Image (cartoon, helix red, strand yellow):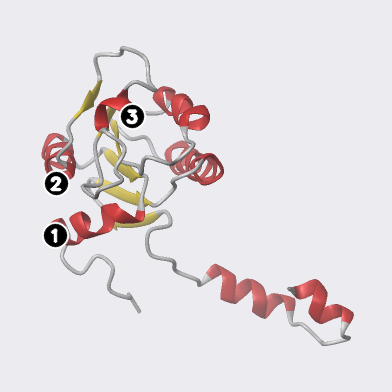
C-alpha cells in the first residue's frame, strides 16, 4: 500500500506509520491474556500462521526462562497444519489436543495423531476442561499457549471475562 501511495507522489511519514503499526493490537494474535502464569492466545490455523506464532513464541521464551511450557491446540477440519504443527513438539513440555466444539471441528484424537506417541501429549475433546486443566496444573513461572482457531475465543471469554475488551 505504501508503494502505491509513493507512486502517486504522496508524502508518507515512515516514523508515523511505524508508530501506528507498533501500537496496533489485534485480538487473538499473540494476545497475552494473563501473566503468572503467562497465557497466550493465537488464532494461528494454517502452516504460515503457525510458523509465525512459533517464531514469536521462541522470541518470548529466549528472554525469560519458563519452568514448564503448555500448549493447547484446536483446529477446524479443513486446516492444513501437519507440517508445522509436528515441529511444535520440541518447544512444549505438555501438549493438549482439543476441539473447538463446532460442527466442523477437527477431532482431538486426529490432532494428537500428528504428534509422536510422547506420554506428555494428550487429547480431551472438551476445550473448556483442556484450558482450565492446563491452567490449574501450571505455576506462576509457566507459560500456556492456546493456539488454533477463532472458535476458541468464546471458551476463553467464559474463563477470562472481558479478555477481548479493548485495553487503552
- First in residue order: circle 1 vs circle 3: 3
**Residue at the (32%, 75%) spot, across then down:** 167
Which residue position is annotated with label 1? 158
Which element carries disc 2, helix, strand or loop? helix
**Residue at the (49%, 43%) spot, across then down:** 46
In terms of depth relative to the viewer, which is nearer, 50 or 76? 76
Residue 17 visible, this orientation:
yes
Residue 125 vertical placement versus 114 (above, below): below
Which element carries disc 1, helix, strand or loop? helix
How far apart marks 1 and 3 lie (CA) works out to: 24 Å
**Residue at the (28%, 68%) spot, across then down:** 164
Which residue position is annotated with label 2? 128
How far apart marks 2 and 1 lie (CA) works out to: 9 Å
Q: Residue 149: x, y in percent?
A: 36, 50
Query: Is the C-beta separation of discs 2 and 1 under 8 Å?
Result: yes
Residue 123 lies in quadrant: top left
Q: Residue 148: x, y in percent?
A: 37, 45
Which element carries disc 3, helix, strand or loop? helix
Classify the position of the C terminus by image quarter.
Answer: bottom left
Q: Residue 24: x, y in percent?
A: 50, 71
Which residue position is annotated with label 3? 111
Q: Is residue 117 left or right of residue 62?
A: left
Residue 34 visible, this orientation:
no
Residues packed near mark 2 inside 10 Å, few (<14), some (14 to 19) or many (20 plus): some
Residues packed near mark 3 inside 10 Å, few (<14), some (14 to 19) or many (20 plus): many
Amino acid at each position: 500500500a505504501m508503494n502505491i501511495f509513493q507512486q502517486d507522489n504522496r508524502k508518507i511519514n515512515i516514523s508515523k506509520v511505524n508508530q501506528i503499526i507498533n501500537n496496533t493490537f489485534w485480538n487473538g494474535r499473540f494476545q497475552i491474556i494473563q501473566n503468572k502464569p503467562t497465557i497466550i492466545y493465537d488464532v494461528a490455523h494454517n502452516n504460515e500462521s503457525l510458523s509465525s506464532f512459533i517464531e514469536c513464541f521462541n522470541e518470548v521464551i529466549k528472554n525469560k526462562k519458563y519452568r514448564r511450557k503448555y500448549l493447547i491446540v484446536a483446529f477446524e477440519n479443513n486446516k492444513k497444519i501437519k507440517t508445522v504443527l509436528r515441529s511444535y513438539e520440541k518447544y512444549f513440555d505438555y501438549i493438549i489436543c482439543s476441539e473447538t466444539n463446532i460442527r466442523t471441528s477437527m477431532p482431538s484424537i486426529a490432532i494428537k495423531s500428528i504428534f509422536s506417541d510422547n506420554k506428555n501429549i494428550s487429547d480431551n475433546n472438551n476445550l473448556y476442561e483442556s484450558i482450565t486443566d492446563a491452567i490449574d496444573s501450571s505455576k506462576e513461572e509457566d507459560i500456556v499457549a492456546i493456539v488454533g482457531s477463532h472458535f476458541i475465543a468464546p471458551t476463553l471469554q467464559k474463563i477470562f471475562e472481558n479478555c477481548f475488551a479493548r485495553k487503552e
